[in-house]
Image (cartoon, rainbow, N blue to C red):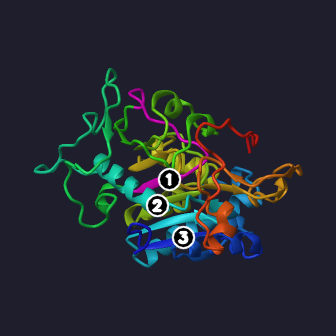
Amino acid sequence: MTIAQFQKIFVISLPLRTDHRDAVSLAAALTGLQFEFVDGVTEVSQRALPPGGEQLGLNSGALGNWRAHMNVAQMVVKEGISSALVLEDDVDWDLRIKSQMQDFAKASRLLVQPLRGTADAYLDPTHPQPSADQQPSSFPVGEDDPTVEPTTSPYGDLDRWDLFWIGHCGSRFPDANNTNVPIGRAVVGNDVTVPEPQHIRMQFGDRQLVDQYPAHTRVVSRARSGTCTVGYGVSQNGARRLLYELGVHNLTSTTDLMLRTLCDGVDGRRLLTCLSVQPQLFQHHRAVGSKASYSDISEHEEEYNPQAFTRNVRWSTRLNFEKLINNETDYLDLYKDGEPALDFGFR
């Protein structure tokens, strides 16, 4: 098992992006992670598209991204893998990712496991659906866990969750207007791996995290309005659902926006049990150089990026390569407490 008990870690990567493969291989080795590359896809036959796909007009990058994620889901299903973490190859994470994932596991159990001594009573009073006048409750993550001890996964038993959207470009909290999911929140307080509010960039999310919670707070909730497939955990049942909904049933948009419909339970998709975390645990790394090299899925301007960065990740593994290789421990932190925010632009 790897990184707090995912059975496998897969990294989707085009073989021609040797720069991405070099960097993610080094990052994983330096933080004690083991993974398997899954080749990205550059050509998709129109005949192989699910219903609706031929009418979308998606570019080759978006279609290749969709097919690569379906190939991972297919592998998880075919090989009977109990759970997997799926990452894209421009990903970065904090040097303390293992302890962060342990905190995420404690948080997720509070939201998906029933209370001890029961089979169907939950800590969240809005489970399974909130009424219109209910407000979200916050549950502190600590040593006292009142829920049933899981036996098949530290994140909660595998039959209780489908997808953990923990690497994204923005996510939101559900509220009582989203009456199809519980709205409780598990709160990791005093988390020194979280930047102060002036440094946090929500991108496609909103400001609830920075406006409603103290500095150094990370919050886990049901996923809502997620964007980007930087990284997600999937159970065997979740992979089957992904493969059916996105690979067989119909193709309606880009991969991340289809995941959103599943986690939000909209546009005719049956609702998955998805959790998300703010700020995210996995994020795109932006290297020095032309912004056009950022992605093989969508176009970026040719403008030059003069400073490498990873949003919302304090001790970036990639930014600390040299220190890690030289066994130095004075790690680079772009988001030091008390310092003004750096402006890296939207992308």
* Classed neighbour count for the residue bearing mark 3: other residues with Cα under 10 Å, few (<14), some (14–19), many (≥20): some
Quadrant of image for the C terminus: top right
For image coordinates 32% across by 46% down, the residue present is 141
Q: Earlier in the sequence, mark 3 or mark 1?
A: 3
Secondary structure predominantly adopted by residues drawn in magenta: loop
- Asked if marks 2 and 1 touch (Cβ < 8 Å), the reply is yes
Residue 169 part of the magenta segment: yes
Task: Report which residue position mark 1 lands on.
Answer: 166
User: How many marks are shown on the rendered structure?
Assistant: 3
Q: Name the mark on residue 233.
A: 2
Residue in front for this viewpoint, 175 or 281? 281
* Classed neighbour count for the residue bearing mark 2: other residues with Cα under 10 Å, few (<14), some (14–19), many (≥20): many
Residue 323 part of the magenta segment: no
Highlighted range, magenta: 162-178
Does dot 1 land on a helix, a strand or a loop? strand
Residue 286 appears left or right of 304: left
Residue in front for this viewpoint, 37 or 2? 2
Task: Report which residue position mark 3 lands on.
Answer: 31
Q: Is residue 343 above or below residue 211?
A: below
Q: Is residue 346 above or below residue 70?
A: above
Q: Amino acid at mark 1?
A: Ile
Q: Position of residue 317 (x, y in %)?
A: 61, 63
Does dot 3 land on a helix, a strand or a loop? loop
